[in-house]
Image: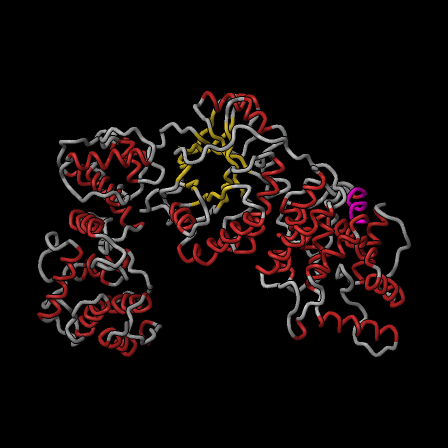
Amino acid sequence: MRDAMVLKAQRFVNSVYGSRIGTTVEETGEADWATMYALTRALQYELGITALSDNFGPTTLSTLTAKYPELDADTVPSPDFCRVIQAGLYCKGYDGGDLDGTYSARTQAAVKKLKTDMGVEQALPGAGLTPKVFKALLTMDAYLLGTSGTRQVRDVQRWLNGRYIGRQDFFVGACDGRVSRDTARALVLGVQYELGMADGTANGNFGPGTQSALKSHPVRQGDKGVYVQLFSAGMVVNRRPVALTDTFDSYLAAAVRAFQTFVALPATGDGDFATFASLLASYGDQSRQGKACDTIAKVTPERAATLKAAGITYVGRYLTNPSATSLPEKAIQPGELATIARHGLRCFPIYQTVNNDASDFDYVAGRTAGYAAVNAALDHGFRKGTRIFFAVDFDAIDAEITASVLPHFKGIKEAMADSGHPYEIGVYGSRNVCAQVGAAGCSTASFVADMSPGFDGNAGRPLPGDWAYDQFVIRTLGSGDGQLEVDVDIASGRDTGQGAFDRPRPAVPDVALDAHQVPALRADLSRYMRSIGRPDLGGIGSDARLYTNAQAVGAIQDQDELITELSHTYTMRKALVQTAVYWAMRDYSLADQATDQQVADHHLTGSGSVKDSHTGIGEISATDAIQAWNHCIGWGYTTGDRRDPGKDADLWSVWQRLNKDNAFSVRTAALIHLWGVRGRPGGQLPPGDRVTTPRSMRLDLAEFEITELLRRYRAWDPDVEAQTHQSLAVYQIFEKYNSIARNA
């Protein structure tokens, strides 16, 4: 909301300091970080600091402390210096006194009110502005209860500020009633100070030293004192229905038992170390024994015995391997699920490709992930009703969750619905990610990445109510052939994985499409293409697409015998050719048709300005076709005469066949994929990772390899990344129906 005094403060900092500090702020009348940064720079200028910065850091604090350990009516050095204080007060919502440059009674009252709201009025009495309070003044932290805050949390925040403001590394925190990373860190600092850690040693991290010392300070019903206050503050920060107290009464004990039950600790009602640890850090007591684990190591009979001996029942394993070369055992290996079942273990599947940056997530990627996970789970033999945990393996902030992660899971949910709801959807990620995906109705249980307490999505956030597995420590178990490294997880019982499996679907060659399945295939493709803004028909202007969904599927069905033959000849999944052709046909537009006419005019009459184009049902240029055929002839994949893409006669001959002969286009599409395997230009492979085999394709290409081959197929397209990204779901849809046919 526009505020006249904030506007006046912004105009003041621009007019007086703009040229001096090298920046101006937008005069909106609304307090924002830009204004606070400008005021920070103005303060630094007044202090004589030459290297100005937006950050109110150690240099600013130490200089201010040395020159003005307390600012008041007698010590403010100049009217403009005072106006910086008054401007900060107005941006915080306090009456700064008209920006008149006088540390007046109104300014003094505002400072007193500010310190009271912060909870430091007793530690720092009076109307003087001390350096740490000044630092807090020039932030966007609020010190009044916010709309989404609670009084109980604000009481904790004010108590921490008041008790520990005198310590070297403790700074005033927000008192808005909302738990943040800073609130959680302040609580750990409080524990460290009470344990006797010196300034400079206490750091707000719940490390080994803090853990060891805290074990000597359990609290239980009947106890009083500061450790009860810290423990009850931890309960409040974890959103338990208690208030800050220095007395451990029966009400607190009952709340503790409920919390212990929720986090799967013994429900004693005592504030023992394990419970205290769960309140202070997302990973809690890392010496706990977990009944679950997840691992990138193959569970062999020897390793299964190790897991059983360690008390493990539930094992998380990955459905696919994102790379062709790294982590060779990450994905479930042949025969592994049978080993798991035989040893009385249960497996919960995890789907993860890259998923470690916001750019990896969007609606289209979610649709692809949903289809791919279903295909992989069926291949491995997971029975219907199994829950698949889809990974969000990075610290997504709220904006990224809203913009990227939630649309991604919407895509997963819709893909699962299109597949007939064979599996439940789970989410792996930070506490915040899991909570938001669950609240959006896109998952039914959470696998929480609690080993990272520094994640913004974990710090100060409660364990999601639907948690199934809580990942809290890495351990190496066993020895010799039975040794493996695992992430140990606590199991809540909300998910129990699977202990019996259907027969795996082997990587057998493809067969002819089942004609009875084609209507369902057509419907799945139609739903997906509509979901990404590509309707079955239509479009306007030069972007109008000429082939409908039904026509594209029909053309592929017409060529099914040839595509099946090519699949067998080159050990190539039919879906690679089907996807290339389907996407090409659905992409072909009026503008492309006009370009094709120019090619014909060029060769027939000399009037056209274009001598080659991407044409036919595979959108293949004559140049690419000639190069693919030449390469494949050289490798012995096919026979024929080599042609020269530099000769118009060769270009025209091949172009006409691509344009008119669907079978030739389909065969050429397969050869382009073979060219892609052998290094066709246009790939995006990271160093050390190669899509290559000695002579042919494989039927078990990793998802990364499939992505790369589809990308290389359209290497000519200026929009190749987006086109590849969108076509991956098409591949998975074709693969779904090819799988049905070959495993009938």
Magenta segment boundaries in residue numbering: 562-569
Residue 741 figure quarter: top right
Give the residue at x 87% y 61%: 644
Instruction: Judge by depth and name the residue closer to the eye, 37 or 451.
Output: 451
Q: Taking 621 as reference, is 172 above or below it? A: above
Which sits in the foreground, 3 or 507?
507
Which picture quadrant has residue 584? bottom right
Instruction: Determine the main secondary structure of the stretch shown in magenta.
Output: helix
566 drawn magenta: yes
Is 603 left, or right, of 63 in this rendering? Answer: right
Residue sitting at x 41%, y 36%: 494
- Provide residue 218's location: percent of width, then percent of height: 21, 31
Quick one: 194 or 319, which is closer to the camera? 319
Residue 571, percent across and down? 76, 41
Q: Residue furthest right?
A: 641
Dividing the image into 4 quarters, which one contains the N terminus? bottom left
Q: Which quadrant of the figure has residue 277?
A: top left
593 in magenta: no
Numbered disc total = 0
**Residue at (83%, 72%) from the top-left corner?**
600
Q: Is residue 42 visible?
A: yes
Q: Which quadrant: the C terminus?
A: top right
Q: Please give left or right for residue 607 compared with residue 496 in the image.
A: right
Left/right of residue 563 with respect to residue 110 in the rendered view: right
Horizontal and vertical percent position of residue 625? 81, 58
Is residue 63 at all visible to an observer of this figure?
Answer: no
474 or 540: nearer the viewer: 540
